[in-house]
């Protein structure tokens, strides 16, 4: 399988030497607004990432997938050799707890990879379907950080 152009870009010496190569990165809010021009209006028929009142389940999984797609999150294993220079594209969090999932790659469906801040900090595979079904303490479920801007792992892992 050929290497996608963006993988060559993020692995290039120029990209890795740039202090902030992601300075033009957009937040999910900005991407959703661009993809869904009517997002946020009272009669909103678009903007599937509007999270208010979305209970855990298949709609939440659809939101996770849409955001990963809008951020052009790379495929699994594509940032494997980058270490701390890998880019975190999407941040999920538990609004009623202290768990956070920093997603660096995904398979285009239900499996993602990234850094999980929970009881401990560790890298691992993330089952998006499982996260989408998790109700949490108040029944809200796991949320997308709509204001998160893609950044290198080294800057967000603290």
Image (cartoon, grey):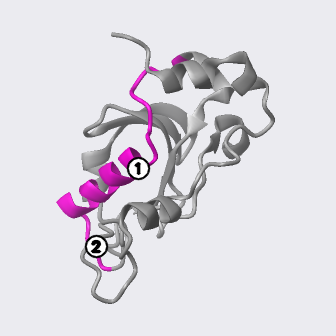
Left or right placement of residue 49 versus residue 103 in this view: left
Which mark, by number, is residue 54? 2
Does residue 51 sit above or below 70 in this rendering?
A: below
- Magenta segment, which residues? 53-80
Give the image location of residue 55, x and y in percent.
Answer: 26, 71
Q: Quadrant of residue 14?
A: top right
Q: Quadrant of residue 59?
A: bottom left
The residue lying furthest to the top in this view is 1
Give the image location of residue 100, x and y in percent.
Answer: 52, 52
Q: Earlier in the sequence, mark 1 or mark 2?
A: 2
Between 119 and 122, the one lying in front of the other is 122
Q: Residue at x 26, y 40 (%)?
A: 110
- What's the distance in space between the residues labelled 1 and 2, CA to CA? 19 Å
Q: Dot 2 lies on which element?
A: loop
Q: For mark 1, does the 10 Å Cα neighbourhood hold few (<14), some (14 to 19), or many (20 or more) residues? A: some
Q: Residue at x 66, y 18 (%)?
A: 12
> Pointer 1: what residue?
70
Between 14 and 88, the one lying in front of the other is 14
Residue 70 shown in magenta: yes
In the rendered image, the quadrant that contains the C terminus is top right
Give the image location of residue 42, x and y in percent.
Answer: 33, 89
Does residue 42 sit above or below 94 in this rendering?
A: below
Left or right placement of residue 155 versus residue 38 in this view: right
């Amino acid at each position: 399988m050929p290497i996608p152009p963006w993988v060559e870009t993020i692995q290039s010496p120029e990209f890795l030497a740039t202090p902030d190569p992601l300075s033009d990165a957009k937040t999910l809010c900005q991407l959703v607004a661009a993809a869904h021009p009517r997002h946020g209006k009272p009669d909103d028929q678009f903007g599937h990432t509007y999270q208010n009142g979305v209970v855990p389940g298949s709609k939440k999984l659809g939101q996770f997938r849409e955001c990963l797609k809008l951020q052009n999150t790379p495929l699994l294993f594509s940032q494997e050799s980058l270490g701390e220079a890998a880019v975190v594209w999407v941040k999920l969090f538990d609004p009623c707890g202290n768990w956070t999932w920093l997603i660096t790659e995904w398979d285009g469906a239900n499996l993602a990879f990234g850094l999980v801040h929970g009881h401990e900090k560790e890298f691992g595979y993330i089952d998006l379907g499982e996260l989408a079904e998790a109700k949490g303490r108040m029944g809200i479920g796991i949320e997308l950080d709509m204001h998160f801007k893609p950044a290198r792992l080294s800057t967000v892992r603290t």
